[in-house]
Amino acid sequence: MKLQTLKKRKEFVLSNKFAKKIFSKNFIIQKHTNLDDKDASLKFGFTATKKIGNAVSRNRAKRRMRSLVSRFIKEDLTCFDKQSSYVLVAKASLNKALFINLYSEMQQCLNKL
């Protein structure tokens, strides 16, 4: 299954304003459920600001978050709500963290949502 991603700025802004946010050490997860949209499906957005570093490190952070989400989807899709969109915002420590630690951190965050 290919990840469906958020493409438009409007979707990211809505998620930032109205989403439920969970803060962790390496990233922030925003879960936004849009009840008005009839064709709402599971979508993901990945953000890395210039605070992370140059373009190479920002792209690496987004790749790591993408692979983290795809691993969760391969293992168990029930941890994500099918009517919601999720935005993952990287923090500066994400690129230095071990993938196993990121995985357990994401599990804890998804259990809180």
Image (cartoon, rainbow, N blue to C red):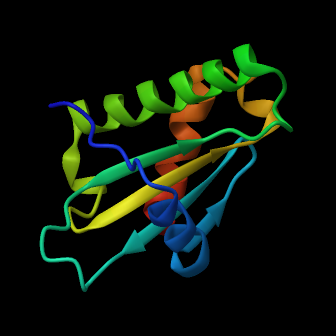
Which of these two is toward me, 28 or 13? 13
Q: Which quadrant of the figure contains the N terminus?
A: top left
Which residue is drawn at the image coordinates 82% and 36% (left, top)? 50
**To which quarter of the image does residue 58 belong?**
top right
Residue 10 horizontal side relative to residue 33, left or right:
right
**To which quarter of the image does residue 85 belong?**
bottom left
Q: Position of residue 64 (x, y in %)?
A: 54, 24
**To which quarter of the image does residue 76 belong?**
top left
Which residue is drawn at the image coordinates 21% and 47% (left, top)? 77
Residue 102 horizontal side relative to residue 77, left or right:
right
Q: Position of residue 10 (x, y in %)?
A: 48, 65
Residue 106 horizontal side relative to residue 33, left or right:
right
Residue 75 horizontal side relative to residue 18, left or right:
left
Which residue is drawn at the image coordinates 31% and 66% (left, top)? 84
- The answer to whether residue 14 is above or below residue 69 is below
Q: Position of residue 48 (x, y in %)?
A: 68, 38
Which of these two is toward me, 42 or 23? 42
